[in-house]
Amino acid sequence: MPYRKGTEPDMVVGSGGRPRDDERESEILDVVNAQLGEGGYDSVTFEGVARRAGASKATLYRRWKTKRDMVIAAVKAGPARDGAGADIDTGSLRSDLLALCRRLRATMAAADGRMPLLLLQAGLEDPELCDEIERSTGPTGARLPDSVIEAAVRRGELPDGIDPFPFEEVVGSVVLLRQLNGLQIDDHYLEALIDSVVIPALRATAFGKAALPAGIFSGRPAHRAVKDTR
């Protein structure tokens, strides 16, 4: 079994000369996901992952240039794997919203809450990470994609000028809270949430005079001002 000079045994060289070992990479990404679950995004470091995975930092840096790249790879390989997919386009607003909610529910269940917590933390602390997760994994269900809004407006299901605030503030928050507390999140609940809260609230945003704040899962929520107590 050939190895490139200077690489670790876990870096198998393929016929094209590029190190690759899918099983080893999967083990490393499992460690990243474990650290995300235990301490959140801030707890993940190259040094900590390397030590826990029994690899060198050089091994990690050969695969991922930045911590963000490593976390996104871990999310795609783990928490988002069962929830990721193509863009949402079912032909109706209600069905699109239900599909988004189902995807978010599946992601949360598969990740034991890690993925939505990561999205929440990323939205609060690293908007670019939040954006990249959405681009890399496909819609997670935590945000309302522009494509869903635009299709609903074209079909006449929503007025022009609506704001995604109700979806991005409410849906991820309540589904996450229910998941963490072991409460039911079946289709009956999701349909009730969509019909009685989300769709009416989305329609109402088109007629408001004041600009709405960014929702907590929007990727760019405003932070509360900290008073100087000195």
Image (spheres, rainbow, N blue to C red):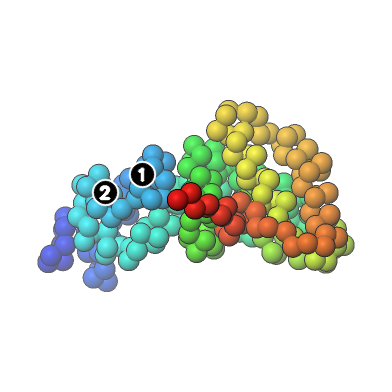
Residue at left 48%, top 59%?
126
Residue at left 31%, top 53%?
45
Point out the image quarter for the N terminus: bottom left
Amino acid type of the residue that numbered disc 2 sits on in the rendered structure = Gly
Front one among 177 and 114 = 177
Circles 1 and 2 in contact, beta carbons < 8 Å: yes
Front one among 168 and 139 = 168
Q: Is residue 152 visible?
A: no
State the SS at label 2.
helix
Report how many numbered discs are placed on residues in the image: 2
State the SS at label 1.
helix
Count neighbours of disc 1 (C-alpha within 10 A) and say few if under 14, some if 14 to 19, many if 20 or more.
many
Amino acid type of the residue that numbered disc 1 sits on in the rendered structure = Gln
* Sequence-wise first label, 1 or 2: 1
Q: Is residue 112 visible?
A: yes
Residue 171 point in image, percent of width and height? 67, 45
Front one among 195 and 94 = 195
Q: Which mark is drawn over residue 35?
A: 1
Front one among 72 and 221 = 221
Does residue 38 appear to the left or right of 121 in the view shown?
left
Residue 98 point in image, percent of width and height? 72, 46
Does residue 222 appear to the left or right of 201 in the view shown?
left
Q: Which mark is drawn over residue 79?
A: none
Residue located beneath label 2 in the image: 48
Residue 196 point in image, percent of width and height? 82, 41
